[in-house]
Image (spheres, helix red, strand yellow):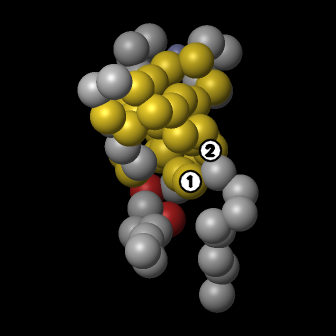
Amino acid sequence: MNQTDTYTSLSTELRTVPGADLVTSGGLQVVVTCPNCGAQHRHLGLGLRRSPCGTWYAVTRTAGLRSEA
Ligand SMILES: [Zn+2]
């Protein structure tokens, strides 16, 4: 599975936060530590997300699968 990050063009104001996989009974979720409020928020996938506290960020895979050209 290769994932290509195409969100770099948004990164001037958008923060990138690493997400940790969380397996639930409903499927896979991603948990991030919010750069805005410091709480942990869950999302259904990677990419551009709006947190419950109202900020936007790009959820990325945690370290290990990152590949930078
Ligand atoms: Zn938050």
Report, in whole angstroms, how far the alpha carbon at label 2 lies from the one at label 1: 6 Å
Q: How many callouts does the rendering have? A: 2
**Residue 24 image point, x, y percent:** 40, 26
Question: Are the two marked residues, 2 and 1, in contact with CB atoms closer than 8 angstroms?
Answer: yes
Residue 28's place in the image compared with 61, above or below, is above
Q: Residues within 10 Å of mark 1 (few under 14, many from 20)?
A: some
Q: Quadrant of the N terminus?
A: bottom left
Secondary structure at numbered mark 2? strand
- For image coordinates 41% across by 48% down, the residue present is 46
- Residue under numbered circle 1: 61
Q: Amino acid at mark 2?
A: Pro
Residue 53 at least partly seen: yes
Numbered mark located on residue 5 in the image: none
**Residue 8 image point, x, y percent:** 49, 65
- For image coordinates 28% across by 26% down, the residue present is 26
Mark 2 or mark 1: whose residue is earlier in sequence: 2
- For image coordinates 57% across by 30% down, the residue present is 32
Which residue sits furthest right?
Answer: 63
Residue 34's place in the image compared with 38, above or below, is below
Q: From the Cβ of disc 2, is ligand 1 less than 8 Å away? A: no
Q: Quadrant of the C terminus?
A: bottom right
Residue 49 at least partly seen: no
- Residue under numbered circle 2: 18
Q: Residues within 10 Å of mark 2 (few under 14, many from 20)?
A: some
**Where on the picture, by quarter, is residue 15?**
top right
**Where on the picture, by quarter, is residue 27?**
top left
Residue 43's place in the image compared with 3, above or below, is above
Which residue sits furthest bottom?
Answer: 69
Residue 23's place in the image compared with 39, above or below, is below
Q: Amino acid at mark 1?
A: Arg
- For image coordinates 65% across by 79% down, the residue present is 68
**Residue 42 image point, x, y percent:** 44, 24
